[in-house]
Amino acid sequence: MNKVELEKRVEELSSLLHQYGHAYYVLDKPLVSDATYDTYFQELLKIENEYPALKRSDSPTQRVGGEILAGFGKVTHENPMLSLSNAFNEADLRDFDRRVQAATTANVSYICELKIDGLAISLRYVEGRFTQGATRGDGTVGEDITTNLSTIRTVPLRLDDPISIEVRGEAYMPKKSFVQLNEARDAEGEEPFANPRNAAAGSLRQLDPKIAASRNLATFVYAIGGDGTDYGIDSHSEALNYADRLGFKTNKERKRCASIEEVLQYIEEWTEKRANLDYEIDGIVVKVDLFEDQEQLGYTARSPKWAIAYKFPAAEVMTKLIDVELSVGRTGVVTPTAILEPVLVDGTTVGRASLHNEDLIKEKDIRIGDMVIIRKAGDIIPEVVAPMIESRTGIESPFNMPENCPECDAELIRLEEEVALRCVNPKCPAQRREAIIHFVSRNAMNIEGIGERVVDQLYKAELVHDVSDLYTLTKDQLIELERMGEKSVANLLSAIEQSKENSLEKVLFGLGIRHVGVKAASILAEEFGTLDELMKADVERLITINEIGDKVADSITTYFSNEDVCEVLRKLKAYGLNLAYKGPVRENLPTEGIFVDKTVVLTGKLIEMTRGDAKKKIEALGGNVTGSVSKNTDLVIAGEAAGSKLVRANELEITVWDELQLIQALGEKEPEQ
Ligand code: IVH
């Protein structure tokens, strides 16, 4: 064959293999025998080996996994990857339904889906080719695991339509593959994985893609357009059908439900049937179908208000309570933890469980030596439910909390209205250690390579006393620590250096100010812009901010009035930490123009562009596009058949433009004379 013929043959083989693979792995309807597939595959492999220039990145031969990577790069998600709020019972679901009904107009339909117990992934395609796959990470920045994801057969390397799109879904390990993998590991004397989710996550975190390729992972796509593009689609159900047409695997068990009663029925049905599935599910996700309704409902900082995850009730098992261990947290709270005879719950071995607090131990009369019932709910720490009083032999001993801190011996205090016992010694080593662990954690400064173990080592070696000391660490100091090689030291130092660039909200959350969680930290960062400005604010100023109440405001001012705190903050500044807000909206955006700082709502159908495109363009010109009309809205763009939002805009006397006015303002067309 000459070059042109070879190229043609490569394309032909790739296309056939792509089609056969899709039929086999995505549709579960094989078109040809394994032998036929293999013959074509070998032919393609042979040509590619002889003429490497003909090997393309979306070739089916790429599934076997290429070279070993040096590490995973970071990927900033164009829109954050959120999580879901949880429902644990019928009442929670009915509350959700009430909230939905209150915020939407017409009859709402829900789509119920299985909640796959794996890990969230984002898949990005440019002109129909798979270009980037990432983990969720902290929701804003994930890891680039493109090579590992391209080994998964249900991830199309090319789409049936050459479009650019981001989709999101779940990567998981089927139950059967999990059992086989653990059997193989056991035979090799390797530690088994605790559950399929850990096995899937562990596989995708391997630097050698051949390992991921050998693990039989699979995916379900559950959303499209993570970058905000809407593809002219109006509902979640249509979006999933569209994903099917593009060649993705979506989960077929989804169902439209016209009422919360039907949702409850679906849940009941799957609570029974889940054991028969080939993969693990940990609940049911209920989503509002129409995008229009979804927009009305909007989002919290962490999750959409238009969806909820019902979690199946936790499994309960019995084991022996061997001892009670005490630990001191970041805020000085002393927590008792049950040390148990290891037992398998829901596929995970559990050796420790929370006992919550002293009152609860007394109330339930839990004694050391008791047989106890323990419960594990999803990703929540297992807890001791109750002792089995009838199994007592008489040698069990009641547990009493100590009067002094188990770490620093200071007297423990019980604050008013609190059940917890607290160590209030600000110099308590346990609190300092926990504060550092919190500071480096994912939602805070996200310093990879420092976990509990390393913080422990750093603290014991007296290298770090407070968070600012992290920025003084040197190679010579770190290399002395146990299990630290040249490479990990270099990675660690670079991660610490990188963290200096974090936006203010990460620092604020990391400081661990009481009552300042991720959301409050973001609100404060956006409101004040810099740490210095925030530190100047008094309680009166703070409570003018929506969502900041008395308790939070008090806690903030008390925190900043502490001299030790101020000293740490001065040091952080001196070491070059960024202490300003770098919010996505305001970064590199124009400061002048018609849309700057304007809150815009898009409604109705646009003809010349999709709503997603319009949103992007307005945001690029400094505007904020939000989902619902309120008194804070500056401008409403009403396309065809605009409904309740337009009515509301008129009621509130907000400026309304049609699409043509928008296009003119975007500067895309000359205004008509
Ligand atoms: S929708 C905006 N649908 O559950 C959030 N999530 O906290 C969109 N998950 O880690 C999530 N099955 O990866 C959605 N059918 C499903 C899901 C699902 C599993 C995971 C998701 C995330 C967690 C939600």
Image: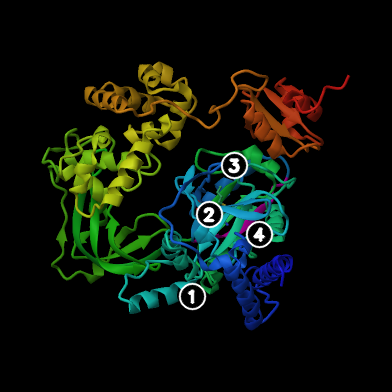
Of badges 2 and 3, nearer the viewer stands: 2
Graded by Cα atoms within 10 Å as few (under 14), some (14 to 19) or many (20 or more), the crowding at tag 3 reads some
Q: Are marks 3 and 4 in contact (CB under 8 Å)?
A: no
Query: Label for residue 176?
Result: 1
**Disc 4 on helix, strand or loop?**
loop
Query: Label for residue 158?
Result: 4
117 or 381, nearer to the observer: 117
Would you name the residue on which mark 3 appears? 99
Q: Are marks 2 and 1 in contact (CB under 8 Å)?
A: no
Q: Tell me which numbered mark, 4 or 1, is placed earlier along the sequence.
A: 4
Mark 1: C-beta under 8 Å from nearest atom of ligand 1: no
- Which residue lies at the image location 68% right of the left edge and 54% below the top edge? 128
- Which residue lies at the image location 72% right of the left edge and 46% below the top edge? 231
Q: Tell me which numbered mark, 3 or 1, is placed earlier along the sequence.
A: 3
Would you name the residue on which mark 2 appears? 121
Instruction: Tell me if I can see residue 567 in this picture.
Output: yes
Residue 553 image point, x, y percent = 38, 24
Q: Tell me which numbered mark, 2 or 3, is placed earlier along the sequence.
A: 3
Mark 2: C-beta under 8 Å from nearest atom of ligand 1: yes
Tell me the kind of residue under disc 1: Lys
| Distance from the alpha carbon under mark 4 to that under mark 1 | 28 Å
Of badges 3 and 4, nearer the viewer stands: 4
Q: Tell me which numbered mark, 2 or 4, is placed earlier along the sequence.
A: 2
| Distance from the alpha carbon under mark 2 to that under mark 4 | 17 Å
Q: Is residue 115 magenta?
A: yes
Boundaries of the magenta span: 107-117
Instruction: Tell me if I can see residue 116 in this picture.
Output: no
**Disc 3 on helix, strand or loop?**
helix
Tell me the kind of residue under disc 4: Arg
